[in-house]
Amino acid sequence: MTTETAKHGGTARRIRLGMVGGGHGAFIGGVHRMAARLDDAYSLVAGALSSDPARAAASAAELHIAPERSYADFATMARAERALPDGIDVVAIVTPNHLHAPIATAFLELGIHVICDKPLTATVVDAHALVEVVRRSGCLFALTHNYSGYPMVRQARSMVAAGELGEIRVIQVEYPQDWLSSKLEDSGHKQAAWRMDPARAGAGGSLGDVGSHAEHLVRYVTGLQLTEVCADVSTFVNGRQLDDNAHVLLRYANGARGMLWCSQVAPGNANNLKLRVYGSKGGLEFHQEHPNQLWFTPLGDTPRLLTRAGASAGMAASHASRLPAGHPEGYLEGFAQLYRDVAEQLHARWQGRSADPLACTVPTVEDGLRGMQFIAAVVASSIAGGRWTPIE
Amino acid sequence: MTTETAKHGGTARRIRLGMVGGGHGAFIGGVHRMAARLDDAYSLVAGALSSDPARAAASAAELHIAPERSYADFATMARAERALPDGIDVVAIVTPNHLHAPIATAFLELGIHVICDKPLTATVVDAHALVEVVRRSGCLFALTHNYSGYPMVRQARSMVAAGELGEIRVIQVEYPQDWLSSKLEDSGHKQAAWRMDPARAGAGGSLGDVGSHAEHLVRYVTGLQLTEVCADVSTFVNGRQLDDNAHVLLRYANGARGMLWCSQVAPGNANNLKLRVYGSKGGLEFHQEHPNQLWFTPLGDTPRLLTRAGASAGMAASHASRLPAGHPEGYLEGFAQLYRDVAEQLHARWQGRSADPLACTVPTVEDGLRGMQFIAAVVASSIAGGRWTPIE
Amino acid sequence: MTTETAKHGGTARRIRLGMVGGGHGAFIGGVHRMAARLDDAYSLVAGALSSDPARAAASAAELHIAPERSYADFATMARAERALPDGIDVVAIVTPNHLHAPIATAFLELGIHVICDKPLTATVVDAHALVEVVRRSGCLFALTHNYSGYPMVRQARSMVAAGELGEIRVIQVEYPQDWLSSKLEDSGHKQAAWRMDPARAGAGGSLGDVGSHAEHLVRYVTGLQLTEVCADVSTFVNGRQLDDNAHVLLRYANGARGMLWCSQVAPGNANNLKLRVYGSKGGLEFHQEHPNQLWFTPLGDTPRLLTRAGASAGMAASHASRLPAGHPEGYLEGFAQLYRDVAEQLHARWQGRSADPLACTVPTVEDGLRGMQFIAAVVASSIAGGRWTPIE
Amino acid sequence: MTTETAKHGGTARRIRLGMVGGGHGAFIGGVHRMAARLDDAYSLVAGALSSDPARAAASAAELHIAPERSYADFATMARAERALPDGIDVVAIVTPNHLHAPIATAFLELGIHVICDKPLTATVVDAHALVEVVRRSGCLFALTHNYSGYPMVRQARSMVAAGELGEIRVIQVEYPQDWLSSKLEDSGHKQAAWRMDPARAGAGGSLGDVGSHAEHLVRYVTGLQLTEVCADVSTFVNGRQLDDNAHVLLRYANGARGMLWCSQVAPGNANNLKLRVYGSKGGLEFHQEHPNQLWFTPLGDTPRLLTRAGASAGMAASHASRLPAGHPEGYLEGFAQLYRDVAEQLHARWQGRSADPLACTVPTVEDGLRGMQFIAAVVASSIAGGRWTPIE
């Protein structure tokens, strides 16, 4: 549980980080910055923080970015940073979805690593193309499905992998919110506006924003391959352009069955991601709003409450923890774990060694592609009147 | 919150109750008897408690039933009781599902009221026929979807009816258990054996045993009309004859959408019925294992925890309560509420007055028919590969 | 988990029960009646239900008590019932505290067993005298510290006795309520009025009403001997005659230390009795408002949630259960367990056999005496300015 | 909810931070560093991280502290930094308790601000002296009673101040842990060793480590003045030199009464600080292990669950939040809030303006003195056999 970056191979320099998007008024950009700072493995030294030049410059100044490294657009930034002797090592992309692919491509083609917010792109076509770009580039590409950074999610993953649940039979995953129960996108709310605009968000509203997290979380914890979906996608708020609720049946390659519910119109749910996994030998429950806990019931035995850094927390959970049990860690710490793991992966590359395997579960561009295929299949299934639709 | 029976029209005599089924080794028969006793509105005076005559007699003796009113079969019992000047007023039917219809018919045709366990029958055909018998008989027929007797379920129903949730948009209902995670029916476990035998249980395994409760609970609380289902029904335990897990998408006449999950292979879930209802103005959550509580969040406001007999409990909840707040009531008290309400309905008939409207929400034979139609549609949808299937 | 009374030695007759107190407007009388009915081991056949003759008669009629066995006063009732060939076996006393002793004495001296509400008496002197009367009488005397009837309380007791917690070090017990946060006794509220009247309640307000339950629960679960108390007793509501809050430090003979808090002025607490026991090998937590659960953490291991009728429930819990896991039992079922255990004790006497040891933990008159000594010591300690005061 | 430092008066430079203590093997030093980094308001540029010079140098290198600003002792560091044109603005002191006073004094006397871990000192005498030093110095002195940085603790404070609870009557505060249930200090565990050594920890074991947090939390939330304590302090683990459990009765100047329990021998409690405040108009409950929530029950009304950034969160909570509701913040974020508030206070000084009042509730040296007086009075009361003992 060291909190500094030098764990492997002596003192490591701070990684030079740039950011595209995330200027004033954004949400997730600030999250990425706090995540990057927490373990002191990064320095934010460059940015194209806004498409509005004045906003970009003001935002950069507040962030102690030197004026000459605050750029008006991402393409300029990529070229300029590539040309610097101490240019950025990695760029964080925190724009609306449709810009992820062009921005990532610009940096990857110049050999700059990428940390990208989710969902991967706005279309499956873009996602396929981006996978190719990443492969060609040889760069590291991390997708911030941040819930995979929670210690107890890692604990769950390791327990499933170790067979503690037996053969997985049933998956229940849900991600309800309530903040779009009325037509917030008409009120000038920037976050709501782009998320419900197909041109910027892609084919999914709640599906892209939260459903894609839910789909990934199942994959991350269980490793199961999703083969087919059967869906009923809805828009409850009048005049809204994208879905605000989706009900999805799931079938997995091993015979497991599941349900996924995502919603942004469920009053009383702030950010209520919950995953339950049931196998022939036991069951697990994880609740994002109480991320320091994981329920585990071995079949026929007493339920037990595993806690982060508690008696039953294994290596995977410890790797992702910073504090003793009972000192709650939260969303930022989970998010920061992805940054910390990326740092370890980069330092390992630079030092010509293998990275700590516990740091190598960060979601990848392929995860992002599967997420886009999931969204596409769900939308297609629903349009087809609820037909079972294979994942491409 | 009176606990005695004389609420209306002076002291009322105890209702004479008979029982078919429920001898040694049964579960739900004992529950019905405790429910009937709790409020002192019934005397158990006759029974055909088992198809095994020795067991029937021994069971009757333990229950203080006079030997001459312990019968070897239900048909004899119906005729004999009908002929007595102080014969039973009402019979409780607590047998496996396939016997509900013939037994109920025998008593109804002789003018004896019926309290019947759920699901209504083993087939939709039987259910239709039984509806007709009930109508012809003029008798009262109560179906023990007992969760509708919980005070906070009644509170939820009254809040939805009063418009506190606005237009209902999303329903999430689930009823997972874990006791059939292995093949218990092969071990001589009587309860498991008939529940997983199509000849006795009907077309639904977990669907009939617990799924039907979930479907009814939605209907009871919201009053919404279920129009279509799209289902994926599974049997995870090898060699099992009926489903042990079902995933169902729901569509309602008003445009609401929902999901229903029932399972008996979900380790860590004892009897984990949970209902969530989301509307344009608020959301409700009810959890059967904590039945003295109901969560309510008005849209944009703070979640509040309504408690049985607490500050926000309304008339419907009070009608179904016996104790002050903080003194937990449970499953038996909820079950007993149906018996108490039936007693009020019968006394009102006999006294030529209208029954207390709060006592008139007990599930009926029509509810039972709809439950059977639900099971049939779910099974049909799943067999058809997940086609949206209308409720008959 | 049989629900009928014939468990031992064949079919047993119903025990004939009388009641003193508990007419219209009372609370605990109705609780005792429901508890007596639940397992069908008793028939309520006589009563002196109110000191107001008209109320007594009307109450009796509603309860199906024959008019000739509804008495105007307890002394008449005792004599008359003693003279009947089928007179009552046992009397339930559900009056204000100051009447417990004279009523119990009247029945005990005629050889009639007693089930008495708590606290035992209004004074320690009365309590000592009553202990003597019970001993002389040879009768059974049960005190309804009802929380000792909860299955998970019995589970806790058996775990402590089995040494699963090691040597007990720390006790935290509390029983807050909020219903007397304002001066309810001035509003004509009958329950509040006698509880805050020293002439009827004795020296303790909240101490007698709820504190005595808390003190007993510790004793019941741990068997520890309380030796000294140091207390700060308060009356927060102006003009109130008895305490509405008490803070007490506890010392036990084995060296354990503890805290007891009782209150009736703590908004948000309905009936929030909670017990925590910590030993050298583990800790337990029980919460009355969720009585189907018991938390157990072995030192250095993962917390586990034991549930009534769940995988880790032992014989003592099973003895006191009626339903499978996940079907919540509540306050009435716990209360009924005392009645069921008393029935077993009486049948065993009558049959000349030893009673089931699991049925022999019902609180006794000696428990009641210790409770009165506790109240007296707490009051004395507080008056003395917080001096450590031995339990008499 | 801005996450950057420039809120007032344009872009502000990062504050230059030094640290004394917190080298390899320490716990709280790493916490301070993460807290300082989170909001990007500080740069850690100097340190005397360990009394072991090699460890100090290695630790400094990992933290990117320039070698020439890694010092072998705090006195040298204070003088050297004072002499630099860009020397540290503020020093964080994260050593065992007995060193707080001499270290703080050394820096304060040179005009360097101090952020100091708690408890303030090892003795009351030292605490008094330190208060004087701070006053003379004119410097800012912040004491990291970090739980006062939680948004919902701030919410609670503002609600009490606004009169939403009425007159406060009853306080229940507790801080149980279990990590010292066996004699960990004998096993080479550095954290345990100094905490149970009177020479380094002072007069309190669990009292200083956790009890002092509990005492402060009450003061912070309610503003009540503690006047007297009556205590029973225990050491359960054989051979331990300081207390591992304390039970304390509390009296406040306004007539409120309370109980405080701290323990490090309560199995099942990781870091279970809980505060409950009851007044004439309502009650509040805060639980440190779920810091995004605050229960509030207005007297006679329904309990409501206030959440960080939820509908009822007021300005004080918003000031201390970084994320939307449902995105859990934790211990580090609460800790970081003190650093963020100190930054605002310093920038305000430098800019010659008043600091944001919401940033001015950080615990002070006077809070620390009161905490030391509390510990001393508790120990004295217990030694005197439980006498009510005034706070000095």
Image: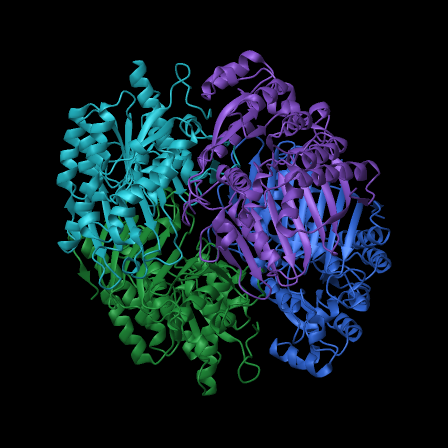
Chain colours: A blue, B purple, C cyan, D green
Q: How many marks?
A: 0
Residue A275: % across, % down = 64, 47
- Find residue C251 and report its image quarter: top left
Front one among C208 and C164: C208
Front one among C115 and A183: C115
Front one among A198 and C88: C88
Q: Is residue C84 left or right of residue A339?
A: left
Residue B266: % across, % down = 63, 36
Does residue A358 appear in the picture of this structure? no
Residue at the spot x=55%, y=25% of the render? B19
Residue at the spot x=56%, y=29% of the render? B28
Front one among B390 and D182: B390
Residue D377: % across, % down = 21, 60
**From what the image shows, is residue C283 above or below residue A174?**
above
Residue C48: % across, % down = 27, 37
Does residue B55 appear in the picture of this structure? yes
* Residue at the top extreme of this rendering: B54
- Find residue A55 and report its image quarter: bottom right
**From what the image shows, is residue B147 above or below residue C38?**
below
Q: Is residue A185 left or right of residue D344?
A: right
* Residue at the bottom extreme of this rendering: D352
Q: Is residue D220 left or right of residue C229?
A: right
**From what the image shows, is residue A158 above or below residue B198?**
below
